[in-house]
Amino acid sequence: MSETKMMDGKVAVVTGAGRGIGREIAILMARHGARVVVNDLGASVSGEGEDAGPAEEVRDIIRGFGGEAVIDGHSVAEPQGGEAIVKTALDAFGQLDAVVNNAGILRDRIFHRMSVLDWEQVVGVHLMGSFYVSKAAALHYRDRGAGTFVHFTSTTGLIGNVGQANYGAAKLGIVGLSKAIALDMQRFGVRSNCISPFAWSRMIGSIPTDTPDQKARVEKLQRMTPDKIAPMAVYLSSDAAADVNGQIFGVRNNEIFLFSQPRPVRSVHRGEGWTPETIAEHGMPALKGSFVPLQVSADVFSWDPV
């Protein structure tokens, strides 16, 4: 067990905890003293099928070093699932202190080929799932006067990537959700933050490698392991982060980033008001120098992981 148990006495729910980043977070939470609800359907990357094996393995690992963990197999993509996950924590451990909304699926398609089902299922797990679990936990947090949320966003939403309109929209929506929770619930001692992870997992294992650039990107990602993400999730869920709220962090191997959040960067004024013509002649030329370039994540994070 860790010498400094930052989560001692706390109960944590980690969704999508059977594999990848969620698995590492659940295990590290337990090593830091948390009693953990290991939520996982055991579905494929695209959200199909169920397999209890991965969650059972994580539970057994935690119990193997003397930690406490229970399994929850409910889907985050339904309101009843979110309520049931929270109920699992309360029934097993009598309280809930930390929620990590990590569960996710991918259905990558270039936009004009994306189906309604591709859209609905990805948004359903990532954004709706984060809402359902958080809403159920929020009622308990309000009554207790304490609690934390860690939500997982992505540079696909914060910056952009090709072929991921559903995923990017959901992940940027999660940023808005996290900020709203932070603002609404700070009066109850509740905190909400986001992590944008860079790590090789099953989900990004589906990234195409058809071109030299794509192959080079995947090779870089493969050097970044899920265990590098877990310490930030544990820290943000602990009392050590009592003054950290409404923020967006990135973790890439041994690097930690604080992301900016949208604020005005430039303005232009015309006393008599604007017409479409004066916007074209005056307004837009004045603003163009501050346009955000149309880039993907790899353009912004162009250096190798440290």
Image (spheres, helix red, strand yellow):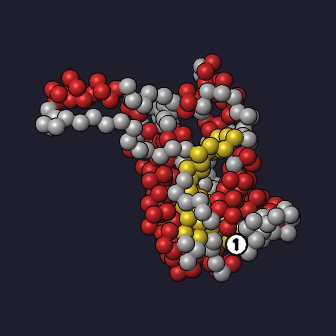
Q: Residue at x 16, y 37 (%)?
A: 271
Q: Is residue 129 left or right of residue 63?
A: left
State whether residue 121 appears in this view.
Answer: no
Q: Position of residue 255 (x, y in %)?
A: 69, 41
Identify which residue, 166 or 245, lies in the foreground. Answer: 245
Compared with 94, 122 (above or below) is above
Residue 232 position in % (x across, y down): 68, 53
Q: Which image quarter holds the N terminus?
A: bottom right
**Which residue is under mark 1?**
10
Where is residue 163 drawn, in percent x and y?
Answer: 48, 33
**Vertical placement of residue 70 versus 151, above or below:** below
Percent position (x, y) of residue 119?
A: 43, 45
Q: Residues within 10 Å of mark 1 (few under 14, many from 20)?
A: many
Position of 35 relative to 169 (above/below): below
Can you tell which quarter of the image residue 233 is in? Answer: bottom right
- Residue at 68% in and 78% down: 92
| Callout 1: SS | loop
